Image (tube, rainbow, N blue to C red):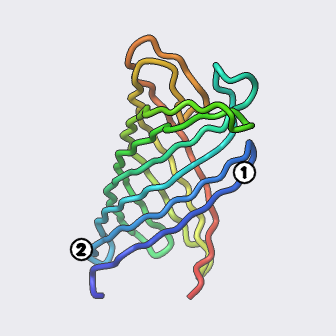
Amino acid sequence: MGSFFPVLSLQTQQGSSALASYSAGIGAGVELSDNFSLGANFTGGFTNHQGPFPPFPGTADISTKNWAAGLTATFIPWDFLGLTLGLQQSYDVTYQIQNLDHTAKLALNQTVRSPSISLTADFTIFNDFTLSLSGQRGQDFCPAGRIYVPSQGQVINFSEPTVNSFSGYSTSLAYNFQ
């Protein structure tokens, strides 16, 4: 496709606290030179997990949906190193919380908006292995009231609309099947 490259991603996660997460994304990029490209992406998904949520005693099922849009700029100074700067705006909506017996439900529409910036370094170790190191900073814009904040993984009660800062990092090792 020349200097234009489309991207499709599908992801599922299963984990502790009955975590079940499903998401999909589409994106596109354009190569401006041999070592510089720009891209845009859109993702969306659903997550369900268990955690404390008063007024339900003990543990509750917390259901959220999310979507995000982002822009990336990638620079490849050498064959073994790629640097990507990303800007993203995401929205997490807690839409339902219910007790584990599913006999009591609380329908919600609480949205947390989270703009963030990330920097990723991709190191090509061998021909088909890539080690990625990434750091991220951002803010959660939370409404007033009792709300589940996904970046903190907990329910917080805000007396007024609040802005919380967050940061994080990740590492991954990937194999490229060609």
Give percent across and percent down for residue 116.
39, 42
User: Which residue is the extreme one toward the front?
Assistant: 103
Of badges 2 and 1, nearer the viewer stands 1
> Which amino acid lies under the numbered mark 2 shown in the image of this protein?
Leu
Disc 2: CA contacts within 10 A as few (<14), some (14-19) or many (>=20) = few
Q: Secondary structure at mark 1?
A: strand
Q: Nearer the viewer, residue 35 or 5?
A: 5
> Which amino acid lies under the numbered mark 1 shown in the image of this protein?
Gly
User: Which residue is the extreme one toward the top?
Assistant: 159
Q: Quadrant of residue 125?
A: bottom right
106 w.r.t. 80: above or below: above
User: Which residue is the extreme one toward the left?
Assistant: 32
For image coordinates 49% across by 38% down, the residue present is 95
Query: Considering the image in quadrants, where does the N terminus appear?
Result: bottom left
Query: Considering the image in quadrants, where does the C terminus appear?
Result: bottom right
Disc 1: CA contacts within 10 A as few (<14), some (14-19) or many (>=20) = few
27 w.r.t. 14: above or below: below
For image coordinates 73% across by 22% down, the residue present is 57
Circle 2/circle 1 CB separation < 8 Å = no
Give percent across and percent down for residue 101.
74, 37
Residue at mark 2 to residue at mark 1: CA–CA distance: 40 Å
For image coordinates 63% across by 34% down, the residue present is 98
Q: Quick check: 102 left or right of 122?
A: right
Q: Which mark is residue 32?
A: 2
Of the image marks 2 and 1, the number of the one nearer the N terminus:
1
Give percent across and percent down for residue 164.
45, 25
Q: Quick check: 89 left or right of 137?
A: left
Location of mark 1 (residue)? 15
Q: Quick check: 83 left or right of 46?
A: left
Q: Quadrant of residue 144?
A: top left
